[in-house]
Amino acid sequence: MAMDLTFLGTGSAYPSPHRGASALVLRTEGECWLFDCGEGTQTQLMKSQLKASRITKVFITHLHGDHMFGLPGLLCTVSLHCTSTAGKDHQPVEIYGPIGLRKFLRVTLGLSSSQLLFPYVVHELVPTADQSPSEGLLDPKMTSCDEGLHPQEVQGRTIHLDPAHNSYTLIENEQVVVKAFRLYHRIPSFGFVVQEGDRPGKLNVQKLKELGIKAGLVYGKLKTGHSVVLENGVTVFPSDVLEDPIPGRKICILGDCCSLVGNAGQQLCHGADVLVHEATLDDTQKDKAMEHGHSTPSMAAEFAKACQAKQLALYHFSQRYKPPALLKEGDEDDVMELKRQAAALLNGQEVILAEDFLTIVIPIKKGV
Ligand SMILES: [Zn+2]
Ligand SMILES: [Zn+2]
């Protein structure tokens, strides 16, 4: 199954003509999952090859405006392009994010009298008090939702930290598991891990021949994990004829942070195929970055190294860093320097400098 990751916005703080505000899309066959939705994400989507109508899930790392101001507008525009008949059978768009997101959407959609032609649901993650300075925590009065659901809203879940695993389980089925883990930022922030399920290994044709099994229905049964009884009464189990399972792909996307809370992040991101980490300022401005709850390239690289991530993609650059193509003679802030700083720590491991509309293809792994 094809899988790719497209950056729609790689700038921090606000959208500019050369960098959109935070947003990226993980696409698997037919479905688009949007991670963060800064202001202007809908126009970035229109400029890309992706279709906004294919967005089935949205994950918001934290409630800073550069990560979510685009969401109500995007939902309204998707609705405008949705025919009323398509809307009827529409599964709710599932939106995950920190507590307060439900209220934000209710108020913005409600006050603007916005009706959607499809349902939506907000599942809220409850942060812990150690994810930000105390002034970054929202007063429960501000996030309470007593005024009732928006007409198109379906009641969502409230997801608490699982203390045994130090993480939040958002989605869990045979195809995929999505978990969130805690980050430290000026306000509570989260990282998300998308772990694709393992696939059954290849059929060992030699063994099948030896057992006298001919290609056909029996092959399919064994491949899908069912044992079969042969005419001679012998039972063949899938494990007898299947090679090792093909490991699923792992994509990790971290929101704004200057550190992690607890060790779940490192464990969950272990061996990530792609690790997306912010690098707002370069290493020479580490104090300033940390003061604002942000990371530098070497901080991102340290984490990627600890996780043994296969690829590190940096994003969320200060708007002072123009894309390399726009760099002029004499410009002091060279974004390529950020790549060099991360690469210096990673001994040749791949570092990707994300730019708006960059797509990273994540190929299916080969059996081990
Ligand atoms: Zn940000
Ligand atoms: Zn932020």
Image (tube, rainbow, N blue to C red):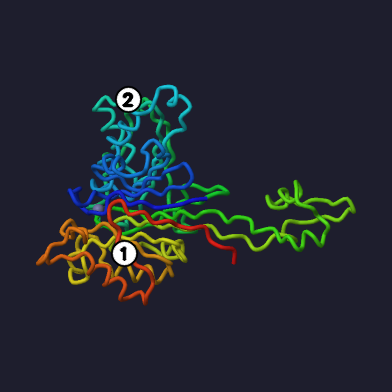
Residue type for callout 1: Ser
- Outermost residue on the right side: it is 232
Q: Nearer the viewer, residue 48 or 193?
A: 48
Q: Residue at x 67, y 62 (%)?
A: 243
Q: Residue at x 22, y 69 (%)?
A: 337
**Is residue 213 placed above or below 117 in the rendered structure?**
below
Residue 295, image x and y in percent? 26, 64
Question: In which quadrant of the rendered view does residue 85 lie?
Answer: top left
**Which label sits on residue 115?**
2
- Outermost residue on the left side: it is 330
Residue 225, image x and y in percent? 69, 52
Number of on-image labels: 2
Foreground: disc 1 or disc 2:
2
Q: Secondary structure at mark 2?
A: loop
Q: What's the distance in space between the residues labelled 1 and 2, CA to CA?
A: 39 Å
Say which residue label 1 marks.
Answer: 259
Is ligand 1 closer than 8 angstroms to the Cβ of mark 2? no
